[in-house]
Image: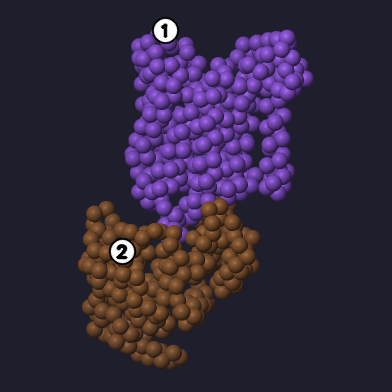
Chain colours: A purple, B brown
Amino acid sequence: MMLSRLPFAWQCIVLGASLLIIAWISLFSWSAVQITPMDALHALFNMDNTSVPQHIVQDLRLPRTLIGILVGASLAAAGVVMQGLTQNPLAAPSVLGVNAGAALGMAAVSTIAPWFGLLGTSVAAIIGGGMTWTLVMVLGSAWKSGNDSSRLVLAGVAISALCAALTKASIIMAEDQASGVLTWLAGSLANARWNTFDHLWPISLFSLLGCMALSPTLNILQLGEENARNLGASLILTKLAGSFLVLLLVASAISSVGSIGFVGLLVPHMAKMLCGQDHRRFLPLSMLLGAMLVVLSDIISRSIIFPMETPAGAVLALIGAPFFIYLVRKRTL
Amino acid sequence: MSLSTHNVCVGYHGKTIVNQVSLTIPEGKMIALLGPNGCGKSTLLKAMARILTPIKGEVHWCGKNLHQMPSKGLAKQLALLPQTQPIPEGIKVKDLIAYGRSPYTGFWGRLTKDDHTIIDKVMQETGVTALAEQLVSELSGGQRQRVWLAMTLAQDTPYLLLDEPTTYMDLNHQVELMHLLRQLNLSGKTIVTVLHDINQAARYCDHLIVMKQGQINTQGTPEAVLTKDMLRTVFDLNAQIHRDPIANTPMCIVEDK
């Protein structure tokens, strides 16, 4: 890849610029009401209040794109931190049961106690994700040193399956809520509005910065737990802080747009292919790539059966699965 | 004496391997930990390097409980080279060695000019300068061992704890390593190393500590420790003690069974 030969600063600039262009495209593309590229720009800088397209951009498209960016960056960063903490290249929120647990928490609250509203479901997602993550870590004995990496993944798969079954059961029991929960389970940005964004950005920003602060320690963890301890890293503190940040990132992202998989699993590997194993570098690149991937999937999800929408999560799975197989075949994992 | 253990019991999964060991590491010396497989020498070393927490007893550093001291500060005082190392994917030799400086670097891990000077120095000492740009995962076992040693040395600590550092190395690199350790020792470092070659230990070290079944069997100078009796009781070997014709240190020659 050409991009991998560029110096790190240029990679950031190229990816940052690409993200801006994709975000701009997502503001005007595939709309039932015709929006021109210039409308999108005008809506951002000097809004003409009488123009319907510009209102659509500002009220619907802009929050949707911004949420896509934050969700992508959050899920990618969560993947990086999980892979770093567990020293397992397959670790990701969707593999280790955090997605499924958060989904179960949300489904349970929205079917059993729908009057809690958005905040209630966010909290339920955090609690559900946290419980499954803890359970998987304990079952996979990830807290002990010298852990067996396949055990962790197996525990994650088993817990995910259990949560998925319970989620389905709770949907069947409360049928009137079912279609909302199903859309949400597939992961879609269609309902992303400014009030979602207002809930999302403080948590995302805090956790993303927290992950950056953790990256030098994640570097040392790559050398194995004995060496990390020997170099003065505090393993317990790092694991607790890292797990907490992952939970915040995943739960806030999932409660905003639903269960979006593959980003956390794939993007860290893409970023590593670009700039190597230094977390201080591939974490920010992962955030950029994750944001690009989610916004791009959202654009594609609108285009497939236009003017209907398909869930962005499904599009991501379509892109993600072949790339994942390619990674496994190349053994770059 | 900075490093000492007091009635220390250490083990894994509730099984005690090192049992009630009280030991003071003589400062400024080059010390070998010897003993048959499974006698607890590596386990004791790991407890002294705070990788393992004792079940009972305490390890002291400068009179205080080592396991309750801030880890980052200790990382500037003692460095451990573990016996088995992971093979990190995609990390270059020079980057790996640079991680040895992390106890000294600030929050973001940025290297100063002094850090680079030390990294260059340890790379020369361990003979890995030519490998700097290669990936650690592409090296041979012996080369990799030297790279890890370089990382440990980059930590620039007065105490060095090494767990079988000569494994995987061919003979000339083993000799080079022992000479390097001797030089580091003469320049003021205290070195504790687990060795499996008794003659190597007797030739290069000042002080031998022999362990058997989780306890210290005997310790002292090579002359005092390396005896027929000790070899029979600890290693179950019939051997003769001769003088090394070059270094004039004691060495053992094993008799036929």
The answer for which chain carries disc 2 is: B
Quarter occupied by the C terminus of chain B: bottom left
Can residue B195 be seen from the camera position used here? no
For the question of whether residue A245 can be seen, the reply is yes
Quadrant for the N terminus of chain B in the image: bottom left
- Circle 1 residues within 10 Å: few <14, some 14–19, many ≥20: few
Question: Residues at badges 2 and 1 in contact (C-beta under 8 Å)?
Answer: no
Q: Is residue A89 above or below residue B150?
A: above
The amino acid on which the numbered mark 1 sits, given as a three-letter code, is: Asp
Q: Choose between A198 and B82: the one closer to the eye.
A: A198
Q: Picture coordinates of residue A203 (x, y %)? A: 50, 32
Residue B33 in percent (x, y) is at 34, 74
Task: Tell me the subunit letter for badge 1.
Answer: A
- Hey, what amino acid is under mark 2? Asn
Helix, strand or loop at label 2? It is strand
Q: Quadrant of residue B228?
A: bottom left
Label 2 belongs to which residue?
A: B65
Give percent across and percent down for residue B87: 50, 56
Residue drawn at 42 percent across, 82 percent down:
B204
Residue A176: mark: 1
User: Which of B224/B199 is in front?
Assistant: B224
Look at the numbered disc 1 and give the secondary structure of its residue.
helix
Residue name at image x 36 percent, y 88 percent: B250
Q: CA distance from mark 2 to mark 1?
A: 62 Å
Q: Measuring 61% from the left and 22% from the top, which residue is drawn there?
A: A63
Viewer-side label of 2, 1:
2
In the visual, does A17 lie left or right of A145? right
In the displayed structure, A253 sits above or below B146; it is above
**Are both tags, 2 and 1, on one chain?**
no
